[in-house]
Image (cartoon, grey):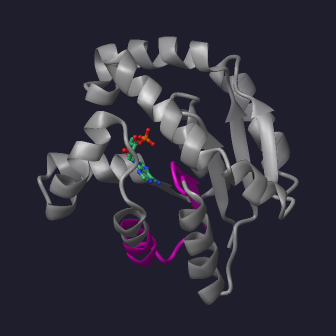
Amino acid sequence: MFNIVIFGKPGSGKGTQADFLKNKYDLYHISTGDLFRKNISNKTKLGLEAMFYLDKGDLVPDSVTIKMLENEVLSNKDVNGYIFDGFPRTHSQAAALDAFLAEKGEGINGMVALEVTEDLLVTRLLKRGETSGRSDDQDELKIRNRFNEYETKTAVLKDYYQDQNKYFGVDGIGSIDVITKRLCEIIDKL
Ligand code: AMP
């Protein structure tokens, strides 16, 4: 299997790039944000549990998120590999993912990270909020809270993957095509 994590702050373009990469490398795309939003719109028990966190821009607790991720992998087993988008977001999630994949004799081949400055991201997210319908994209305080969650809980994952020689950052500013090319140059060598 070939498994990659696409990493970056909220609004850095992970979902957009993952859409291209999943086709190019024939990977199954798992976006935990999309899964939560699907559960919220379907009013499932999981959705009801997660909606307050998403609306505030807080991370959903690890226990809930890890279980959802594992269920999604187990329901989609016959694939060449996965592109994980928005997961892991905490040290516990990263450790759980490694352990879960190791049980299957698999692992993460690499983490590709989109590096973008925060000011640009706020502008991008507010613009996206005009059409995305996402309450967490429409309010600058919620956006700042998402960055705060990133800094305090998620940013450590750069070191986590760097320690395993699996972290590869790219400049996430530029046209979509140019950024895809930067990512592919790295992924082709993994
Ligand atoms: P995203 O679409 O990736 O920006 O995620 C939107 C929201 O979903 C986040 O602000 C969190 O509330 C929640 N979420 C998504 N992925 C995770 C995760 N791995 N851990 C905890 N919360 C998550």
Q: Is residue 23 visible?
A: no
Residue at x-position 72% and y-position 46%: 112
Residue 71 included in the magenta stretch of the image = yes
Estimate the x, y position of residue 24 in percent, counting from the top left.
65, 48
Q: Nearer the viewer, residue 122 or 74?
A: 122
Q: Quadrant of the C terminus?
A: bottom right
Q: Which residues are magenta?
A: 68-89
Left or right: residue 63 compared with residue 46: right
Q: How many marks?
A: 0
The image quadrant that residue 4 belongs to is: bottom right
The image quadrant that residue 7 belongs to is: top right
Left or right: residue 9 compared with residue 187: left
Q: Is residue 169 above or below residue 174?
A: below
Residue that protrudes farthest toward the left in the picture: 43
Q: Is residue 111 visible?
A: yes
Estimate the x, y position of residue 61 in percent, counting from the top left.
37, 59
Residue at x-position 68% and y-position 50%: 156
The image quadrant that residue 142 belongs to is: top left
Residue at x-position 36% and y-position 67%: 68
Estimate the x, y position of residue 101 in percent, counting from the top left.
61, 78
Estimate the x, y position of residue 69 in percent, counting from the top left.
43, 66
Left or right: residue 94 compared with residue 173: left
Q: Nearer the viewer, residue 162 or 134?
A: 162
Q: Is residue 110 above or below residue 140?
A: below
Residue at x-position 56% and y-position 48%: 153
